[in-house]
Image (tube, rainbow, N blue to C red):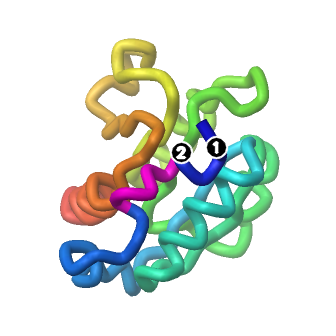
Amino acid sequence: MTHSELLNPQHHSRTRSDEDIDLSGCRLLVVEDDYFVAQELCNALRQHGATVIGPAPNASRAHQLMRDGLPTCALLDINLNGDFAFDLARALRAKRVPIVFATGYDEEFLPADLRGTPCLLKPVDFNALARAIRASGEGR
């Protein structure tokens, strides 16, 4: 599988159904350790109007990026070069920042306190990602 296939190209290319996806006003923190996956994800989000914070390859960089302001939602890969993003997810939750996991792990891998968090499997369906981002904002 190529890096660009991880953002499911069937759903990434602009089609009539996703032209209506408007993420304007969303400040999205992207935490992904794979450079190519991060770039594909950020480009797709920007094409739909989102302001992207990052990408951050690890939790430390994510915390640095948030010094300039909190995101409206965070997209996290679970495995960041061997370190799990669970502590970062908990810190974001404590600040009332909604989280969406975009990962190779399924929801069963999540610790009990993080279950119920939207968990999208790679390759990420962009329409599903946009719906999860929108839904996360409705719960705030």
Q: Quadrant of residue 77?
A: top right
Q: Nearer the viewer, residue 25 or 63?
A: 25
The residue positioned 39% from the left and 26% from the top of the image is 114
Residue at the disc numbered 1: 2
For disc 2, the neighbor class at 10 Å (few under 14, some 14 to 19, many from 20) is many
What range is drawn magenta here? 6-11
Label 2 element class: helix
Q: Up-down: is 10 above or below 45?
A: above
Amino acid carrying label 2: it is Leu
Q: Tell me whether circle 1 and circle 2 mark residues in contact (CB < 8 Å).
A: yes
Q: Which numbered marker is on residue 67?
A: none
Q: Up-down: is 64 above or below 25?
A: above
Residue at the disc numbered 2: 6
Q: Nearer the viewer, residue 101 or 70?
A: 101
Q: Position of residue 123 (x, y in %)?
A: 45, 41
Amino acid carrying label 1: it is Thr
CA gap, disc 1 and disc 2: 7 Å
